[in-house]
Image (spheres, rainbow, N blue to C red):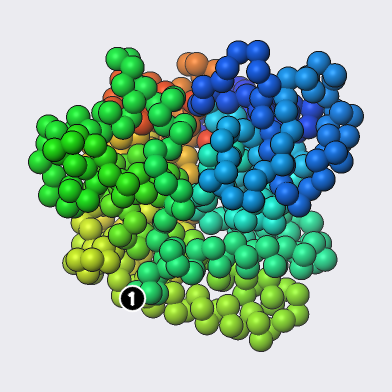
Amino acid sequence: MIQKLTSPPITAVRTYIKQTWKTLTRSHHHLLESAQDTKLEHKPNTPWLVYISPQEDCNTVKSVLERSLSAKEMQQIEIRTLPSEVEAIEEHGLLYLPGAYVVPGGRFNEMYGWDSYFILLGLLRDEEWELAQSQVEQLLYQVQHYGTILNANRTYMLTRSQPPVLSLMVLALFQHTQDQAWLKSTLPLLEQFYYYWVVPPHLNSATGLSRYYALGEGAAPEVLFSELDEAGRSHYERVKEYYQQFEIDDYDVSLFYNRETDELTDLFYKGDRSMRESGFDITNRFGPFSVDIIHYAPVCLNSLLYQMEQDLAQIHEILGNPELGQQWSDRASLRRERINQYLWDEDQGLYLDYHFYSNQRRHYEFATTFYPLWTGLASPAQAQRIVQNLSLFTAPGGVFTSTRVTGNQWDAPFGWGPLTLIAVQGLCRYGYDAEGHDIADKFLTMAIKEFTRCGFFVEKYDVERCSAQVSDEICFGYSSNEIGFGWTNGVILELLALQSLDLKD
């Protein structure tokens, strides 16, 4: 049990995380480092590209950067103004952000949308107030200058977002600052981001629920270059081989793969990009490789939109706008009704994703069933049913992502910090403290044991074997286990606080 660990491991954990915030921070001083991207091919002796918003003045930005970078560093980057149309981008690069931000680590050397929420929790726990403020400000800047919160601030991710957690971040920061003027200033951008998700193509009008739906076309550039196996085959080549070898009844394969020409279809790539927008890349949750995701109302996304509606109601109440607050509360109530109508499965006692075309829920047990507990939209009876099914997900190292072993990193036997925290906090919210603390205890024990062995935290774990060594088990996408790791660090600090373990020396 974690409580039996002596204080030195906890002290070492805290010291590592505190130091790692600095390692993972990117600012103007780190722009050359930030611009470098191992996920795309780069010609030697050519500058790294940094794109700025058309709303910014190129010369002004250059002047700002010149105060932070040496002349030699400035020569190794090229500042360009972003074209008004994404399709006009011929060479990919970093998207400029004006302030400091924390990246996840490893191959993820840019700012990610939903990673940032769990990173923020860690920054706040660690009293990194200035960096926490800047983390939120950079996401607000993205909405204002790039149209939405991006999967990450690279040009090849301009056409997809990530799970919406911005309102949670704004309120978490406000709890510390109590700055009502700042809170008011965020409202237009919060609402702009909200409407990204609740109008077509993200809206399914028949159910009134939303879906993941990336706006780009074709293969994801970063996948083509960087997600190669030992034989040099890309993820997409491995997918085609899978389609050739196996019969699939999860969806109509002809929508996504042409057997005669051995080619993936345009719709496959649309689904593949949308799966990446969901943050769950990759799982078989929506059928093999989740490319059928565009035809589903997912539990996670709609739970987060319910939370966002509740958050906007709360913000208006704080700012003295009760009538506007009530309008957002009404929206949340309506979404709650729709979620329970379409996504709650009484027979299974779980929340499941809903397929628009077949009008059926997909019976694929996934840890997103804890989201409605985490956001408080489930009834006590529904929470009890989920707890009765807890054994489906509990593992020696926390919670399984799903109940299926598929060779994908977002399925069994793998577990991730964010889903662990969501499950733990959701259970505790409904009074299942013993169950929540038990899961927290298992995850902390595993993560700290592996930290003691190797000296760092990673993005994911095999929660069956309680191991950070996962690469041999992952067949699709990228198989590495990245070191850092931003959101794991944040979750560790949250769980230590939940377990009432002294975070101070």
Question: In terms of depth relative to the viewer, which is nearer, 103 or 8?
Answer: 103
Measuring 13% from the left and 44% from the top, which residue is drawn there? 248
Measuring 63% from the left and 24% from the top, which residue is drawn there? 36
Can I make out residue 107 in this image? yes
User: Does residue 394 sit above or below 38 in this rendering?
Assistant: below
Please identify the residue farthest to the bottom as the structure is shown: 323
Measuring 68% from the left and 63% from the top, which residue is drawn there? 189
User: Residue 139 in the image: x percent, y percent?
Assistant: 66, 50
Which kind of residue does numbered mark 1 sit on?
Answer: Ala
Going by the image, does 201 lie left or right of 294?
right
Classify mark 1: residues with Cα within 10 Å, few (<14), some (14-19) or many (20+).
few
Q: Which residue is mark 1?
A: 206
The N terminus - image quarter: top left
User: Residue 337 in the image: x percent, y percent?
Assistant: 39, 78
Q: Which quadrant would residue 230 be assigned to in this image?
A: top left
User: Does residue 78 sit above or below 126 in this rendering?
Assistant: above
Measuring 50% from the left and 63% from the top, which residue is drawn there? 197
Q: Which quadrant would residue 492 be assigned to in this image?
A: top right
